Structures are given as C-alpha cells and as structure tokens.
C-alpha cells in the first residue's frame, strides 16, 4: 500500500542524509512498525510522506503510483496521517474537529453529505470518543485529545493509517486500547504504519518491524527477527536483554542499568 | 441563545446603526425623513446631507469594518495566532509610509492619496513575503509574522525620519490620516471599496475551508491534503490587500481586525466561513458605531475614528474576555 523505495532524504545543509536508502512496504492487513532511537529518521519518513520534505533520491509509492503524481487531496483520501504533535490555537468541539477529516472529500462549496456524516459517526465510534464529541478540544486530557485526533484520521476514510508516536502521552489502559484498535483496523484490511518507541508493545502487536539506525534500515522482519539483543544493543547503544514475556509470549526488551556493561 | 437568533440580532444591529448613523449628527433627522431623503424626497438641503454627506460616510465605515474584520479572521486562522491582525503584518506601516511620503511631496488629492497608501501597503506585503522566503521559504507562520512586524517597525522609523523636519501642516495631515477617518467619504470611494471588499471577501470565503485546515498547524494541514506554503501565502496576500484597501480609504482604524474575530468566536462560531461572515457583520457594526460616536461625542470637533474604535471596542472585548479563554 505504502512503499518506500531506496528513499534518501537530506535536510538542507546537513552533511548526512536523515533517511538513507530506506526500502520497505506497509502492506494492507498488517501493522508495520518503524522503530529506532531518537534521530534515526522515523519522523523524517512521515514528513517526506506528507511532502514537507523532498526526497533526494528514491520514491514513495501509494499502490504503485509515485507520490509526486498524486494530488494532495487524493493522497489524503487514501492515506490518513496522525502527526506527532498538534495543538489547536482556536478551540473546536471534538466533533467539529473530527469532521475536518472529511476535508479531502469536500468540494469548495458542497455541504456535508450523508456519507460524510456516516464516516464521521463511524470514526467516532471506532476510536471510542463518542462521550467526548460535544466537548471542547481545549478541555480534553492528553489521552482524550490523542484519541480524538485518531478519530479525525479515521474519518478521512483511507485504506492506510500512519501514526507518528501515537501513544506517547497515554496511560497503560489507553495505550493498550490504542494498540488493540490498530490491530483490529489492520485485521479489517487497513495498512497501519506505526512509528513508535514502545518496542515491547510493538513486538506484541506489529506484524512487521523496521528498525532504523542513523537513517538506514538496520533490521526488518517479524518481531522475533528484529527483537534480538545482538541487533538492538548497538543501535540503541545501551545494554539490554531480550526475554520472552511469560504471560503473552512475544519477545520483550529489558534495558539494563548502564554500569553493568 | 440559538445561533440563528444571534445572526439575526447582529444583522438587525447593523441595520439599526446604519439608520442611526445617517439620522444622527449636527442636524438630526427622523428615520422617516431619512428614508424619504434617501429616495430623493424632501428639501434639497436634507437630501444633500443624507445622500452626499452621511450615507457614503456610513457605508464606507461599514465597508472598512467588514474588510478589517474579515482580514483579521483570515489572518488569525491561517497564521494560527490569536494576536495576528492586518496591521501587525506591515500593512499599516507600508500604507502609512505611502501616505506620508505622498503628503510630504505635496500630493493631497483625495484620488491620489489612497493610491499611494495602497501602493505602500502592497510594497510592504511583497517585502514581507520575499523576506519570509529568503528566511527559509517554509510554511512556518512565525517567519511571516516576524517579517511583517519587522517591516512595520522599519516603516514607523522611516515615517518619523520623514516627518522630523516637515512643516507643521504636513505633520498634522499625516497624523490625522494615521488616526483614521471616514469624514471625507464620497460615493466613488465607496464603490471602489465595495468592489474590493466583495472580491477579496469572496476569495477568503472560497478559501474558508482551507483556512479551517491551516488553523490546525503545518503538519496536520499537510496530512489533510493542503499545500501549506501556497495556501498560507494566498490567504496572507488576499487579506493583507483587503486591509490595505481599507487603509487607503480611511487611514488606520485600529483594533477592529484584532478584536472582531474574537467576539464572533466567543459567540460559538468556529469554522472560518461563518466566522468570516460574522466578522464582516460585527466589524461593520462596530465601525459604524465608532464613527457615530466620533461625530456626536464632542461636537463640533470630530474624534479620530481609530481611537474611538478602540474605546468602543474595549468594553465589548472585556465583557467577552472570560469566554475567550
């Protein structure tokens, strides 16, 4: 669905590319997680996908169509992106905010149609923000706001959902509920591309992990293939062990105290 | 109150203020006489007062208020800044330079002075965009704001230099112009500003949904399919030119562009299309009211319109302040 092909992205005047020859695909029906230390190029991928940065080389394809050939709104109809940070200067009601997700489908003057209302209602239900719909965005807690933002992305109605660190401000229950939602969306056929620092949760929920290190793909594959101390330790530059979570099975990372190395 | 009731009240208030503005003054007329004179009935002097003195003045005031209200609403939304207003972005400084230079070189014609002010404002807007581009060409509204503020500061300094050794009459003329006034209004001026406000206001309404999205921020707007750079620049140019047109017609009328959008938002209007309409309505009413106060508060003297808009606007603003935060 979203394919990065030998992508090279360099910030102006930077000596090294922020993303260097990255190739992978976020496929329909799967949760694909991009992980890596701070500054490894994760968010640069997202910004390039949003065409805020121009690749130096390589391409991004949306179902075989090169990104550059897609109209921006057409892209937004197919791929929904929840960016890392977002704060509103002027308050909206949560429902008004979710409704803005229909912008890529709107004409200049056309009023909201029945399918818009249906998409908004479905998104609100999926993200579980029904009780918040009437609230002002300025009154939402960090976790509530994050869920409302995901509802907005779902209202866009695309086949792909890209999330840049979506659970950063969430407590355990809300974080788990989010990951459950991502897994369910992927099961229902969406391509879910997740940028996350939560390695252990990602290992539980993702079908594919892509580990970035200094802009390059250090490892990619099923969680079991990427979650190895021999791979992760040099990338994160921190001593760690991988255990197997006794309760649920998948590999889990335990960082060690620094001085034990 | 229901939303529809509020809209109706605002529209009625504007109509009432327009009628009051035409009826009240050094010669006060009853609404019936005003209506008759507007249609050309009654004695010649009354018809002259109504048709050539007061009506163009009141309509010009309404247009100035509508233009500034819309420009402020569009700029605050697209720049994501509650303090943004047309004058902050170099428009007022540029226009003032144009006018002051014109006055000092001896241009006083009512036809040419607005043109010079407009040219100055347009130049300032262009400079702000070029500067913002040179500073990285990114969509970051802060860069544009900064460029506008710097150009405004430069313009103010330049005005002081020009006026430093100007003859007293020139200084007085320039100062009066900078305080804003619709006293010299004629129908030709009204026609120009009406066309301008309609075209620019229509363009802003056309971009209204885009402004909703721009207000979310750079990355979320890009995620929703908006070309942030281009759209932001477009809103900036159209609203600044609209503000420049009002400045050319009536000098600097402060406070309206800043406060009116907040008043409308406080009434629960959040999406930019209705917000633009509401800001036009409330802005028009506020400036018509301010001009009325400017004329009748201390006759026969006229108070500067720009000062009165602030004096009239502040109580409204304070009354709403708690609802804004």
Image: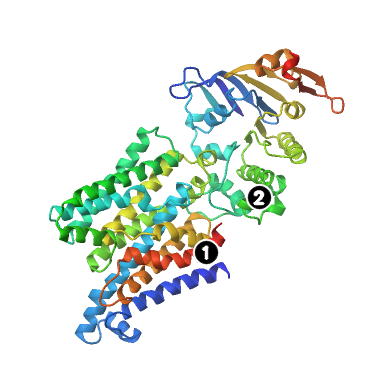
Task: Point out residue A183 in the picture as x, y percentages from the top left corner.
Answer: 74, 34
| Crowd rating for badge 1 (residues with CA inside 10 Å; few <14, some 14–19, many 20+) | some
Task: Point out residue A16 in the picture as x, y percentages from the top left corner.
Answer: 50, 17
Q: Is A30 placed above or below B72 here?
A: above
- Where does label 2 land, which residue? A140
Viewer-side label of 2, 1: 1
Looking at the rendered structure, which numbered label has been put on residue A244? none
**Which chain letter matches label 1?**
B
The one nearer the camera, B110 or A223, is B110
Task: Point out residue A226 in the picture as x, y percentages from the top left corner.
Answer: 72, 18
- Where does label 1 land, which residue? B320
Q: Is residue B65 left or right of residue B57?
A: right
Colour scheme of the picture: rainbow
Residue drawn 44% across the image and 42% down it? B141
| Quadrant of residue B67 within the rendered picture | bottom left
The one nearer the camera, A103 or B100, is B100
Which residue extends farthest left?
Answer: B106
Which residue extends farthest right?
Answer: A247
Q: Is B43 placed above or below B295 here?
A: below
Marks 2 & 1 on one chain? no
Task: Point out residue B276 in the picture as x, y percentages from the top left corner.
Answer: 45, 58
Q: Circles 2 and 1: CB distance less than 8 Å?
A: no
Query: Separation of disc 2 and disc 1 at Cα?
Result: 22 Å
Residue B119 appears in view: no
Q: Is B78 placed above or below B268 here?
A: above
Q: Secondary structure at mark 2?
A: loop
Q: Is A191 placed above or below B244 here?
A: above
């Amino acid at each position: 669905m979203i394919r990065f092909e030998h992508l090279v992205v360099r910030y102006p005047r930077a000596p090294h590319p922020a993303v260097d020859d990255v190739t992978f695909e976020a496929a329909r029906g799967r949760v694909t997680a991009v992980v890596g230390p701070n500054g490894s190029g994760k968010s640069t991928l997202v910004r390039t996908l949003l065409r805020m940065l121009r690749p130096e080389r390589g391409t991004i394809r949306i179902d075989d169509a090169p990104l550059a050939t897609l109209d921006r709104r057409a892209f937004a109809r197919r791929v929904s992106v929840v960016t890392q940070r977002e704060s509103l200067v002027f308050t909206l009601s949560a429902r008004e905010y979710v409704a803005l997700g229909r912008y890529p489908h709107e004409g200049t003057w056309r009023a909201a149609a029945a399918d818009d209302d249906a998409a908004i209602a479905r998104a609100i239900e999926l993200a579980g923000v029904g009780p918040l719909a009437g609230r002002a965005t300025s009154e939402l807690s960090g976790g509530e706001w994050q869920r409302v933002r995901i509802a907005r992305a779902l209202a866009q109605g695309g086949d792909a959902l890209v999330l840049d660190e979506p659970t950063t401000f969430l407590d355990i229950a809300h974080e788990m509920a989010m990951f459950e939602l991502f897994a369910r969306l992927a099961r229902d056929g969406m391509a879910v591309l997740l940028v996350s620092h939560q390695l252990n949760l990602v290992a539980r929920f993702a079908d594919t992990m892509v580990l970035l290190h200094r802009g390059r793909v250090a490892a990619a594959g099923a969680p079991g293939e990427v979650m190895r101390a021999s791979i992760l330790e040099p990338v994160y530059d921190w001593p760690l062990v991988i255990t197997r979570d006794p309760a649920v099975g998948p590999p889990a990372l335990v960082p060690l105290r620094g001085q034990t190395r | 109150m229901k939303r529809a009731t509020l809209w109706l009240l605002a529209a009625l208030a504007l109509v009432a203020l327009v009628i009051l503005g035409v009826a009240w003054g050094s010669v006060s007329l009853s609404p019936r006489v005003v209506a008759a004179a507007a249609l050309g009935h009654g004695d010649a002097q009354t018809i002259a007062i109504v048709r050539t003195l007061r009506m163009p003045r009141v309509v010009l005031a309404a247009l100035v208020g509508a233009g500034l209200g819309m420009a402020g609403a569009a700029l605050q939304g697209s720049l994501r800044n509650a303090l943004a207003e047309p004058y902050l972005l170099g428009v007022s400084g540029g226009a003032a330079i144009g006018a002051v230079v014109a006055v000092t070189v001896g241009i006083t014609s009512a036809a040419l002075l607005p043109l010079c002010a407009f040219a100055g404002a347009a130049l300032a807007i262009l400079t702000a965009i070029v500067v913002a581009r040179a500073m990285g060409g990114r969509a970051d509204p802060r860069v544009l704001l900064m460029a506008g503020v710097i150009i405004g500061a430069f313009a103010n300094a330049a005005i002081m230099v020009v006026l430093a050794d100007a003859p007293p009459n020139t200084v007085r003329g320039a100062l009066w112009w900078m305080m804003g006034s619709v006293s010299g209004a004629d129908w030709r001026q009204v026609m120009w500003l009406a066309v301008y406000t309609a075209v620019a206001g229509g363009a802003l309404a056309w971009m209204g949904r885009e402004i909703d999205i721009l207000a979310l921020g750079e990355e979320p707007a890009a995620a929703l399919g908006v070309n942030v750079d281009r759209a932001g620049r477009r809103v900036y140019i159209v609203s600044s030119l609209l503000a420049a047109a009002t400045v050319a017609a009536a000098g600097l009328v402060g406070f309206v562009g800043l406060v009116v959008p907040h008043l409308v938002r406080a009434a629960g209007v959040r999406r930019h299309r209705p917000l633009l309409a509401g800001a036009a309505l409330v802005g028009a009413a506020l400036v018509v009211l301010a001009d009325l106060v400017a004329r009748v508060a201390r006759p026969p003297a006229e108070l500067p319109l720009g000062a009165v808009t602030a004096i009239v606007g502040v109580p409204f603003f304070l009354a709403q302040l708690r609802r804004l935060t």
